[in-house]
Image (cartoon, grey):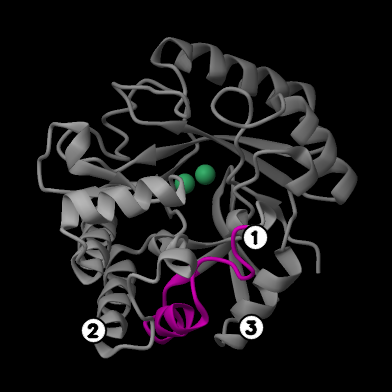
Amino acid sequence: MTLKGNYHTHTTWCDGKAAPEAFIQTAIDAGLEYLGFSAHACFPFDDDWHMKVADYRDYFTNILELKDKYKDRIQILTGLEADWIPPATAPDYKIYKGLPLDYIIGSVHFGGKKGGASPDEWVGIDASTEHVAAGLKNVFGGDGKAFVKDYYERVRTMALSSDCDIIGHPDLIRLRNTELGFFNEDEEWYKDEIRATAEAFAKSGKVVEINTGAMSRGLMTTPYPSLDFLKMMKEHGVHIMINSDSHTPETLLYGFDEAQQLARAAGYTELWYLTREGWQTQAI
Ligand SMILES: [Zn+2]
Ligand SMILES: [Zn+2]
């Protein structure tokens, strides 16, 4: 079935490959009713894949102009995918205050030593395999379990202490495990981590996304999260949505059928989507 919308979309305002209007055209052609833009943000910093701090105002002006231009054909929403890098920045409305935000996706993209100020103390979790391998060795002394536990502790703390609306790619740590094999998802300690994280999601009341972004980039054959993790979320009553984390208009709806199959396999019968009036559900 056609989903109501996609809310995890990256354009040339950050590391996406096309301007917002190209995504809107694709969304309308595909029959989406809602499209949300979520430029990478880690205010007050930026880098080559996060939106430039100087561009924030222009980004929102651009999206709001398009929202008005296409208002009779599709509802456009303004969002950010904001990083959790304590104590430097968080996906909190107070950090992005004054901006006309409809929603914030909170994402953990970095692991590392607590409070580390040096880049040598951080690992980019969805960076290249080489970078993750080096970080695992240099920051965690090659201890894959410690790397994974650090990651999930960050995800849980973000879920419980920030006021973001959506949790992004909740088991991103799996991305480079296929090649690097630094943990085994079947081991009990790993299941304990994802169970505790599902409990934290439930307690937070936030919506968690099924994310097909690594599938469209050819890096994984299934979405985030794993079926096991999703089943635990279902057991705990966590609300879910499906997002493509798209960086090109061609991948705007990539993997949505597989993602729905995964949701159903975990026992889900409805998905959440965001409107100007708040969250609603559609049956799947
Ligand atoms: Zn992300
Ligand atoms: Zn993203």
Proximity of marks 2 and 3: CB atoms separated by less than 8 Å: no
Q: As shown in the figure, which amino acid type bears the numbered disc 3?
A: Arg
Q: Is residue 263 left or right of residue 174?
A: right
The correct choice, above or below, for 273 with respect to 29 in the image is below
Q: Earlier in the sequence, mark 3 or mark 1?
A: 1
Task: Point out residue 193 in the picture as x, y percentages from the top left corner.
Answer: 26, 76
Q: CA distance from mark 1 to mark 2?
A: 27 Å
Q: Is residue 137 left or right of residue 102?
A: left
Proximity of marks 1 and 2: CB atoms separated by less than 8 Å: no
Q: Is residue 265 visible?
A: yes
Q: Secondary structure at mark 3?
A: helix
Residue 282 falls in image quadrant: bottom right
Residue at the image point whose x is 60% and y is 53% from the top: 213
Q: CA distance from mark 2 to mark 3?
A: 26 Å
Q: As shown in the figure, which amino acid type bears the numbered disc 1?
A: Met
| Image depth: mark 2 or mark 3 in front | 2
Q: Residues within 10 Å of mark 1 (few under 14, many from 20)?
A: some
Residue for badge 3: 264
Q: CA distance from mark 3 to mark 1?
A: 19 Å
Task: Point out residue 138 in the picture as x, y percentages from the top left corner.
Answer: 19, 49
Q: Residues within 10 Å of mark 2 (few under 14, many from 20)?
A: few
Residue for badge 1: 215
Task: Point out residue 100 in the picture as x, y percentages from the top left corner.
Answer: 47, 25
Q: Nearer the viewer, residue 233 or 180?
A: 180
Residue at the image point whose x is 49% and y is 69% from the top: 178
Q: Which residues are magenta?
A: 219-239
Q: Is residue 283 visible?
A: no
Q: Earlier in the sequence, mark 2 or mark 3?
A: 2
Residue for badge 2: 189
Q: Residues within 10 Å of mark 3 (few under 14, many from 20)?
A: some
Residue 282's disc number: none
